[in-house]
Image (cartoon, rainbow, N blue to C red):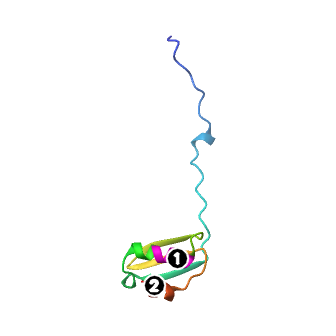
Amino acid sequence: MPTNVVILPRASTAARQSPPRPVEPEYQVERDLKAKFVPSPQKLLEELRRAVGPDQYYSVEMRHNVYKIRASTDFDLQRLISSF
């Protein structure tokens, strides 16, 4: 038998479990915004960052021509629209 062979023990069941999922931030506010009011997705993200605040969490999804905006703090949707 060659001397450079190493026999490893069987992996335990704990090693085969999937890693824990990251904790998703809690969103307090949910708003819908029709896509026709948004000139570009990049502009929406810039203005949303200003409206919500740089240290707050937010999420944007597009579904059926509507942006679904979730944020950790309240923001004025009309002011967001008027900033475009």
Q: Residue at x 48, y 84 (%)?
A: 80
Marks 1 and 2 in Cβ contact (< 8 Å): yes
Q: Residue at x 60, y 27 (%)?
A: 9
Residue 40 appears left or right of 19: left
Residue 12 has which mark? none
Q: Residue at x 51, y 15 (%)?
A: 4
Query: What stretch of residues is rendered in magenta?
Result: 46-52
Callout 2 environment at 10 Å: few (<14), some (14 to 19), or many (20+)?
few
Indicate the position of residue 21 as horizontal and vertical percent values. 58, 56
Compute the Cα span from label 1 to label 2: 10 Å
Callout 1 environment at 10 Å: few (<14), some (14 to 19), or many (20+)?
few
- Asked which quadrant contains residue 65, the reply is bottom left
Residue hosting label 1: 50
Q: Nearer the viewer, residue 4 or 38?
A: 38
Residue 13 appears left or right of 82: right
Q: Is residue 61 above or below residue 1?
A: below
Residue found at the very far top of the displayed protein: 1
Q: Quadrant of the C terminus?
A: bottom left
| Magenta stretch contains residue 22 | no
| Magenta stretch contains residue 50 | yes
Q: Is residue 63 above or below residue 7?
A: below
Residue hosting label 2: 83
Q: Residue at x 43, y 76 (%)?
A: 44
- Asked which quadrant contains residue 35, the reply is bottom left
Residue at disc 2, secondary structure = loop
